[in-house]
Amino acid sequence: MTIDIGSSVLKERPYWLDTVAMPAGAPGSLPPSVDVAVIGAGITGLCAARALARRGANVAVLEARTIGWGASSRNGGMVLTGLKLGVSILIARYGRELARKLFEATLAAIDHVEQLIATEHIDCHFARCGHLALASKSAHYRRFARAADVLASDFAHPVRAVSGAELRSEIGSDIYYGGLIDETSAGLNPAQYVAGLARAASAAGAVLHEATRVEGLERHGSRWRVMTARGALEAGAVIVATSGYTGAVTPALQRRIVPIGSYVIVTEPLPETLALEVSPRERMMYDSRHFLHYFRLAPGRRLLIGGRARFVPETEATVRESAALLQRAMIQIFPQLRDVRVEYAWGGTLDFAFDTLPHLGRLDGLHYALGYAGHGVAMATHFGTSLGEALGGSDLPASPFAGLPIPRAPPGLYWGRPWFLPLAAAWYKLLDWLS
């Protein structure tokens, strides 16, 4: 399907999916019984299934739509250090020791992504290009400088502050007040990565079932009965890997996760000289606003720009509205792209916990990993693998995130329908104006 935004005709689907042949699910009916049922065939679920199957478990992955359909193939392909919460907030909330362990886990997660890609020979354009955080206001740049000091002194992690005068060597835009460079971060093609994970999980022995929406869960002693759109099966354990698409089948988790819409546009291929001007070092980039924009050169010299143009989860109407807003933002950031055609526009749904941290653990007998808050490529790989290894009998040290309880809203305020998102959007717009 195409839509018309101004003079541009956009394909209303993720660009990444046009770069890969996604593997299909297994044919045939569901097995009557498995050791572990995994709900969701995104990065978390596929990594968990791969780890379990490699340890001899009988695993069924149950996907409501198609492999990688959700945020796993709709994101910007950024493999970033750190978390949504800044290091100073982590220290204030959890103390230096735990904050350091949480941050170090994000670095280890990127290493794990790189190692997994090498082990499974996944061709997904993985590159350690680093990321550039951009200060939208002068006060934000001063905050970046303080964060650089904390990262160096408390986390032994070197980053580099770049003044506004020096930014032209990093980005072809004059609207920012400076930036912070972290060379550890990486980029990849997320759909190609997910396709590689699916093939790896299948090769290890996991069975992937598409169009198999889970419609109910019943616990019978130590086992689960899992009802799906294609029939029922029994499982010794269940992993919930549904992220922003967590629903009423798992109500306790649904009440702890807020689904927030994020939107992306991708341009036509840029001339080589223009691409080099826009992003000389091909870094992953994002700005410092609450209503942030993130952008990068995708393979093929296309500019990808995304953000929470609307907070609400995607619909046909919000994708179209957001495409126009993002195109306007692109031209504001890069006036030299005024005549560049935008070819793709799509939306996806992020998962935020109420403490803005990712979580993995067990709740009401269900194992879960979710709440990535826009840092899902690396953390979903880490969490999915950690869950699979733990259920598969590994004696590896537990993730520092495993001990953090996943909070919920005060009783009566939230039951899984985010009625407050328009209010949150207005509040964040006000903060962006005031800060």
Image (tube, rainbow, N blue to C red):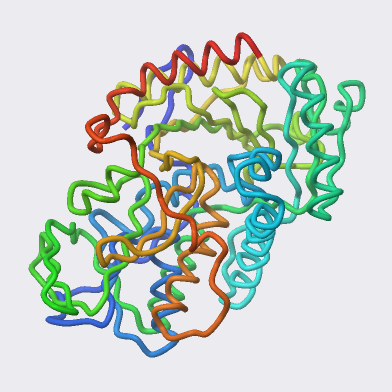
Q: Is residue 116 above or below residue 427?
A: below
Q: Residue furthest left?
A: 231
Residue 406 placement (x, y as % from top left): 41, 50
Measuring 56% from the left and 76% from the top, which residue is drawn there? 120
Give 179 or 398, whichever is nearer the viewer.
398
Residue 317 placement (x, y as % from top left): 30, 21
Residue 274 placement (x, y as % from top left): 76, 29
Measuring 25% from the left and 54% from the top, which residue is drawn there? 65
Residue 248 placement (x, y as % from top left): 18, 47
Q: Is residue 380 above or below residue 274?
A: below
Picture quarter containing residue 24? Answer: bottom left
Q: Is residue 345 above or below residue 198?
A: above
Q: Is residue 171 above or below residue 333?
A: below
Give 62 or 169, whichever is nearer the viewer.
62
Image quarter where the C terminus lies is top right
Picture quarter containing residue 275? Answer: top right
| Numbered marks: total | 0
- Relative to 269, is 32 on the left or the right? left
Measuring 57% from the left and 76% from the top, which residue is drawn there? 397
Q: Residue furthest bottom?
A: 56
Measuring 15% from the left and 75% from the top, which residue is drawn there? 30
Image quarter where the N terminus lies is top left
- Relative to 79, is 175 on the left or the right? right
